[in-house]
Amino acid sequence: MSKISDCIARGWCQGAHAVRVDNAPTRVDSPQVKRWDITGAMFAAGPQEPGTVDRILDAINDFRRQRLSEAVKNPKTPLSELRTLRKNVTEIHRWNDDPQRSKSDVMHVLERAGV
């Protein structure tokens, strides 16, 4: 498991790059951090190999396309969700912070990206 995945496995958050046990935002390198978002985990993990961000974005967009494929088969899928799934993701933190996102989704993407 990479340092990025290890951070997320220990604790994942939304709405901040890192939070303490009381959910208050903190610096990603603070000894009080209990959970990170993907971006915060990337910073906490230290220097990354070239192409890491691109691999994560590619994995996110593969995940998005898979979800879109599943959603179009379901007649109950709201049109707003289909519109959202059609858009290419260009910002990791916005994908991380989507209210529909789960830690499992994040771990799946990181595994697929090889980070």
Image (cartoon, rainbow, N blue to C red):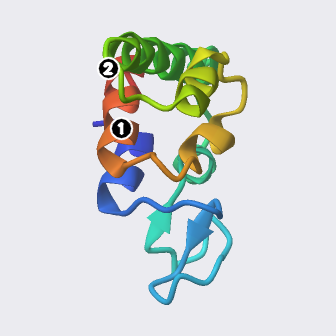
| Residue at the image point whose x is 64% and y is 35% from the top | 92
Q: Position of residue 70 (x, y in %)?
A: 32, 16
Give the residue type that dot 2 points to: Asn
1 or 66, which is in the foreground? 66
91 or 78, which is in the foreground? 78
Q: Secondary structure at mark 1?
A: helix
> Would you identify the image quadrant in which residue 5 lies?
top left
Q: Which residue, as the protein is rendered here, is positioned at the far bottom?
A: 22
> Would you identify the image quadrant in which residue 47 lies?
top right
**Number of the label disc, if any, that sits on residue 105:** 1
| Residue at the image point whose x is 46% and y is 12% from the top | 65
**Number of the label disc, if any, that sits on residue 26:** none
| Residue at the image point whose x is 40% and y is 40% from the top | 106
Picture quarter with the N terminus: top left
Q: Position of residue 87 (x, y in %)?
A: 67, 18
Q: Position of residue 83 (x, y in %)?
A: 63, 22
User: Which dot, 2 or 1, sits closer to the camera?
Assistant: 2
Q: Taking 71 as reference, is 39 above or below it?
A: below
Q: Give the residue pinned by disc 2.
A: 74
> Would you identify the image quadrant in which residue 50 lies?
top right
Q: Which residue, as the protein is rendered here, is positioned at the far right?
A: 90
Q: How many C-alpha atoms fall within 10 Å of the one at disc 1: few (<14), some, or many (≥20)?
A: some
Q: Mark 2 and 1 residues: CB-CB less than 8 Å, in contact?
A: no
| Residue at the image point whose x is 53% and y is 16% from the top | 61
